[in-house]
Amino acid sequence: MDDEQVLLPEDVPSQWGSDVIAETIRATGVPYVALNPGASYRGLHDSLVNYLGNRDPQMLLCLHEEHAVAIAHGYAKVTDRPMAAAVHSNVGLMHATMAVFNAYCDRAPMLLLGATGPVDADSRRPWIDWIHTAADQAALVRPYVKWDDQPASVRASAASLLRGNQLTRTHPTAPVYVCFDAAVQEQPFDGRVVVDPARYAPLAESLPSPESVAAAAELLAGAQRPVILAGRGSRDQAEWDRRIALAERLGAPVLTDLKVAAGFPTDHPLHAGTPGLFLSPANNELLRGADVILSLDWLDLGGTLRQATGSAEPQARVVSASVDHQLFNGWTKNDHFLAAVDVSLQSRPDAAVAALLERLPERSPAAAPSPAAAADPVQRPVEATGPTGRLTVSFLTRTLREATRDLPVTLVRTPFAWNPDLWPVRGPLDYLGTDGGGGIGSGPGLAVGAALALAGRERLAVAVLGDGDYVMGVTALWTAARYDIPLLVVVANNNSFFNDELHQDRVARARGRAVENAHVGMRLEGPEPDLAQLASAQGVHGIGPVRTPEELVDAMKRAVDSVLAGRPTVVDVRVERGYSGDTAAAIAERSR
């Protein structure tokens, strides 16, 4: 990665409080710190550059604090490990809060570094230090971080970093926030804080009790109609393979969820139906007929069961592998509807899978299905254009897949209109899920962070974004251009906040009002934003607008060639408004 040259003597002694903080950050092992600079941590900034030499971690300059946090979030989605993001005082933290909430809801590890003006009022500069100092700065994010601290000395700052690093890496993972006093950073410090990172490692993960594993294995072994809900899982290939082995051992159909990263191959014979943001009618029926349901940290288990069974408790016995409850609090309701659970395996879901495989009896090889060579969905006929003559998202998907078919691709994001049947997921890095908190504008930053983590892995990072998400976060792409991070962003541009058009349509119908007005206050028209020019303004290669099938085929080829040459690239594709059949049906059923 490209970086500024740092003039640094061979041996720079530690002389300041921020030098110790910087050295401790290095000890945590985070490779990068994404930041938008600010005076509250000017001492730490100097230490990262002039004491550490801008190495381990390397700074990544961002144009907005929300992008800095989103980039760290995207990095964690690929690696299951944290990087750092730094935000300036209360104002920078307020800019970043949406991205922090996304990362928390997505259970992404992250070392969030902050700073406040001098806590000692006598040390504050007039005006600016006063408005950038808060009595309890972490209160801005405390409901959606795992832990926070504001240490008051140099040694305490080092200890807080070590604890925060330990906690953010311990399952269930989530961001932590450490706020440094500006005066502590800038005080002389002639002592030394020796850190052995091995002594402050993440806490050992909890394992399900033998009794709970035995009870779950008994239910599953005796089930006639088991169903597995594959929710949050790791990006580890061995753990991916064990999930497949468990499903095959049980002969159980598996449901997956587009809100979280890939959990199971979608073209495996045991994968049931089409994954989506909401359960399809067919998958609801499958759940209603199950006699045992195994939830592997399924997002909103209670709400999913309620959607399938109504207000009645499910007839199926429910086994749940999760410790997500450890992050629940009273402020944010991402605890979701309380699920009826018969056996609780209190562990990381992949640890529960391994324990169940050891306990469950083997099936005969003939009884265990194996993946079949299905017809390649890229060959399925799709309509190139829709009723208004615009390109369909299905045709965009097929064209993009054809252009990348010889490359391993990581889908970082997809829009609501995405049809997953046209893009099989076959490995743990094939798809990374959504942003967690439903905050529009996160997509570009997440894409940059994921591409950063994938650099050197010979995988192409591809994000298919909605136009609203893109325009809110487009300046995050400057960081990709600045640090030569290869990335392909395709904007499925329907010139509308279309999901809200559907909401207005629904309200108008319920009230007997004019549905023809549903688009008012929703369309990005008069003028239409020039998305390719917005990309070019960030130093990124911009292509488009693309309006015809022939233009799209050519644009995708040029875009892939551009990214393979090392240049981040954006393609603006003008698409029809609307969703795929399965998505539309699921939304309609959910809205009843």
Image: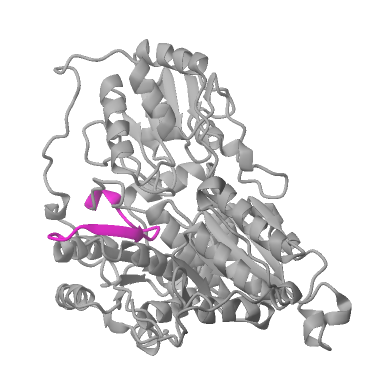
Whether residue 224 is visible here, answered yes or no, is yes
Closer-to-camera residue (515/15): 15
Closer-to-camera residue (249/474): 249
| Residue bounds of the magenta highlight | 405-422
| On-image quarter of the N terminus | bottom left
**Residue at horizontal 59%, vertical 63%?**
112
Quarter-of-image position of residue 281 = top left
Disc tally is 0
Against 148, is 343 above or below? Answer: above
Closer-to-camera residue (266/89): 89
Residue 246 colored in magenta in the image: no
Rendering coords of residue 441 (x, y %): 50, 69
**Residue at horizontal 66%, vertical 57%?**
160
| Colour treatment of the image | one colour
Q: Is residue 140 left or right of residue 316?
A: right
Whether residue 464 is visible here, answered yes or no, is no
Q: Is residue 471 left or right of residue 365?
A: right
Against 352, is 489 above or below? Answer: below
Rendering coords of residue 430 (x, y %): 28, 52
Rendering coords of residue 60 (x, y %): 46, 76
Rendering coords of residue 45 (x, y %): 58, 79
